[in-house]
Image (tube, rainbow, N blue to C red):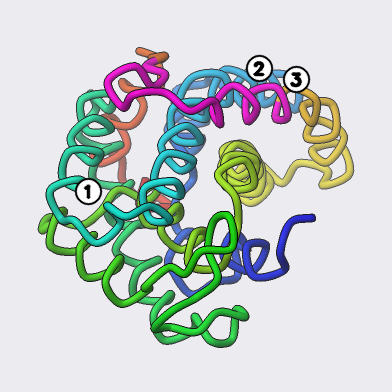
Amino acid sequence: MVAAGLLLLADARLPAGGHVHSGSVEAAVRAGAVTDVASLHGFLRGRLVSAGLVTAAFAAAATRLAGSLDGGDAACWAELDAELDARTPAAGQRIASRQQGRGLLRALPRRAADFGARPDAAAGLGGAEVDAAAVLAALRAGCPAGAHHPLAFGAGAAILGASAEDAAVAIALAAVTGPASAAIRLLAFDPFAVQSVLNSLSSTVDSVAATAAIPLPWSELPDEGAPALDVLADTHPTLTDTLFVS
């Protein structure tokens, strides 16, 4: 069973700044690539099986790292961060990911107890204890420019006692729910129609999460790319009068 704390960590209402990011759907709308619910479906599916798979895999890997004996090793976090950075070619995506990671880390330490975990030693993977303070300090030290969002999420998931598989599902789902919500705001889509699109993608979310959660050496983690998303991510900063920052 997925812990309620993990659901809170993934909730868009968490004051971590995720609500100001559109997952490039705003740039897609401006480019005419998303104009109706059908084109939104295609956009979301494409994002899920590319960027969604990669970020879910790194969230799962981060969960395992945080719950391991190396969780307090800044060098390990730096290595994992570099692997994700190499899979994120668009500067706009890297900036947005680190912004959201910093926001999540700001929210997590002060709210960890409310999520059901002791900030100093929370129940982690396999019933072992995760030293939350040590893990978060190592993550910050290893990622001085700000941790990528999947790494911050994975660290939080481990602190809350969630599994790598749970973290992968949460991040894979967020890869489509965030942009879907943004599309409703941008184009005034019927929310029920958009929810139907999300429902139709649920089995793909499960499949992507299952693939993402497979334990692999970090150099062999998924590296699926989406050049169109890269272009959109780097186009967004050039737009004016936007609702979202990315």
Let me know if residue 206 is in the magenta part.
yes
Circle 1 Cα neighbour tier, 10 Å, few/some/many (<14 / 14–19 / ≥20): many
- Give the image quarter of residue 220: top left
Residue pictured at 30% horizontal, 65% vertical: 135
Q: Is residue 144 above or below residue 123?
A: above
The answer to whether the residues at label 3 and label 2 have Cβ atoms under 8 Å apart is yes
Q: Mark 1 sits on what residue?
A: 77
Q: Which residues are magenta?
A: 205-223
Residue pictured at 48% horizontal, 75% vertical: 15
Relative placement, left or right, of 100 versus 123 is left
**Where's residue 240, x and y in %?**
31, 46
Q: Amino acid at mark 2?
A: Gly
User: Distance between the Cα atoms at labels 1 and 3?
Assistant: 39 Å
Pair 1/3: label in front: 1
Q: Amino acid at mark 1?
A: Trp
Q: Earlier in the sequence, mark 1 or mark 3?
A: 3
Residue pictured at 23% horizontal, 30% vertical: 83
Q: Mark 2 sits on what residue?
A: 42
* Residue 38: image tag: 3
Relative placement, left or right, of 87 versus 50 is left
